[in-house]
Amino acid sequence: MDNQAETTKRKRRLFPRWRKMTWVLMIESAIFLIWIIAGASDRPSKDCEADAILSKQDCIAASDAGTAIGVGLVIFFWFLVTIVCLLIWIASRPKDRKETA
């Protein structure tokens, strides 16, 4: 009966029982994903108007290039932060074996 009570207790969890660094990786990835979506969707090329310096087509092309550079930098930072978090995650892995004295 203890085994059955233990399995029903496990099924009732709202969140999985992961290590803390796994949660950090998931939250970090969600934040960067939201940042990329917000940066790509809020591009200034929607508000371009022709003026003396740039035509409307040049303004759209320049703002889209700037958006691509910005999103590319966010992806690069996401990669760097993920590498650091993964190294910490690997280094903090719990040991499965028991010490024998």
Image (tube, rainbow, N blue to C red):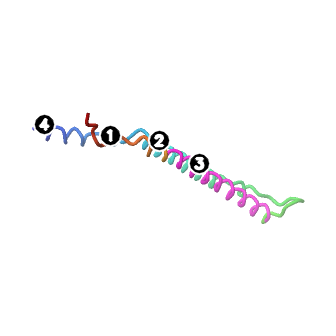
Determine whether the residue tagged by mark 1 lies in a helix, strand or loop. loop
Neighbour tally class for label 4: few under 14, some 14-19, many 20 plus, Cα within 10 Å: few
* In this rendering, the label closer to the viewer, 4 or 1: 4
Rendered view: 62 above or below 11: below
Rendered view: 24 above or below 58: above
Determine whether the residue tagged by mark 2 lies in a helix, strand or loop. helix
Residue 55, quarter of the rendered image: bottom right
Between discs 4 and 3, the one toward the N terminus: 4
Give the CA distance from mark 2 to mark 1: 18 Å
* In this rendering, the label closer to the viewer, 3 or 2: 2
| Chain part drawn in magenta | 58-85
Labels 2 and 1 touching (C-beta < 8 A): no
Between discs 4 and 2, the one toward the N terminus: 4
In the orientation shown, which residue stands out farthest toward the right?
52
Residue 92, quarter of the rendered image: top left
Q: Which residue is mark 3?
A: 35
In the image, what residue type sits under mark 3? Trp
Q: Which residue is mark 4?
A: 2
In the image, what residue type sits under mark 4? Asp
* Residue positioned 18% across, 38% down in the render: 6
Between discs 2 and 1, the one toward the N terminus: 1
Q: Which residue is mark 1?
A: 14
Q: Is residue 78 magenta?
A: yes
> Predominant secondary structure in magenta?
helix
Rendered view: 4 above or below 46: above
In the image, what residue type sits under mark 2? Val
Between discs 4 and 1, the one toward the N terminus: 4
Give the CA distance from mark 1 to mark 3: 27 Å
Determine whether the residue tagged by mark 3 lies in a helix, strand or loop. helix
